[in-house]
Image (cartoon, rainbow, N blue to C red):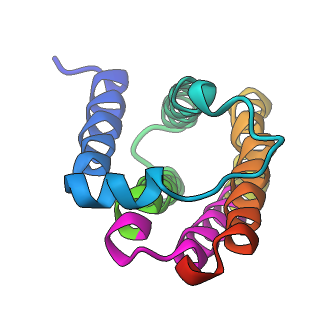
Amino acid sequence: MIQSWMVIGGVAILVALAANIMTPSDRQWFRRLRRPRWLTFEAAIPLIWITIFICGAWSAYIVWETAPDTNKTWLLMGLYLLLEVVTIAYTPVMFRLRSLQVGTLLGGTGLTICIILAIVVLTVSGWATLLLVPYLLWSPIGTYTTWQMIQLNPQDA
């Protein structure tokens, strides 16, 4: 029998793979952009996001196991999926459109979805909500960084 954590993890991995839909010229565009001087931790960002996605999947697992196969739980799973899709879309969509404004908009949208999700999940499980805190803390930093890059690269806004 397939366990719920396998399905949740599998879906998370499949969605995350979509972030790799970029061309070399997309990557080159992003590499040439100026960054804020205080951005000294850029190499750690992939590890930060991996941790956030693991916490998000774990949160979804707790919600599912708390009330499996109910309408509310299915709606919450849809909200978790929407959050991941918006978050994953940040890189390929921003790169393809070569627009830091689009990246800022997607970052802010992800934060808004996560706030809504955390509020609703709080009625189901405190632990599941606590696992969303890394996203709630990091997303504003990433969004602010992208916004700062607009100021440094106005031609790529």
User: Residue placed at 81% from the left, 42% from the top?
Assistant: 137
**In magenta segment, residue 6:** no
Residue 128's spot in the image, x, y percent?
68, 32
Residue closer to the observer: 9 or 50: 50
Residue closer to the observer: 53 or 43: 43
Q: Quadrant of residue 8?
A: top left
Residue 95's spot in the image, x, y percent?
38, 64
Position of residue 14 relative to residue 104, above or below, is above
Q: Which residues are magenta?
A: 94-114
Q: Quadrant of the N terminus?
A: top left
Q: Quadrant of the C terminus?
A: bottom right
Residue closer to the observer: 139 or 11: 139
User: Residue placed at 73% from the left, 55% from the top?
Assistant: 145
Q: Quadrant of residue 130?
A: top right
Q: Is residue 57 left or right of residue 107?
A: left
Residue closer to the observer: 86 or 79: 86
Q: Quadrant of residue 127?
A: top right
Position of residue 120 relative to residue 5, above or below, is below
User: Residue placed at 53% from the left, 38% from the top?
Assistant: 67
Q: Taking the image as drawn, is residue 74 in sight? A: no
User: Residue placed at 52% from the left, 57% from the top?
Assistant: 83
Q: Is residue 27 left or right of residue 137?
A: left
Q: Give the main secondary structure of the magenta stretch.
A: helix
Q: Is residue 36 left or right of residue 32?
A: right
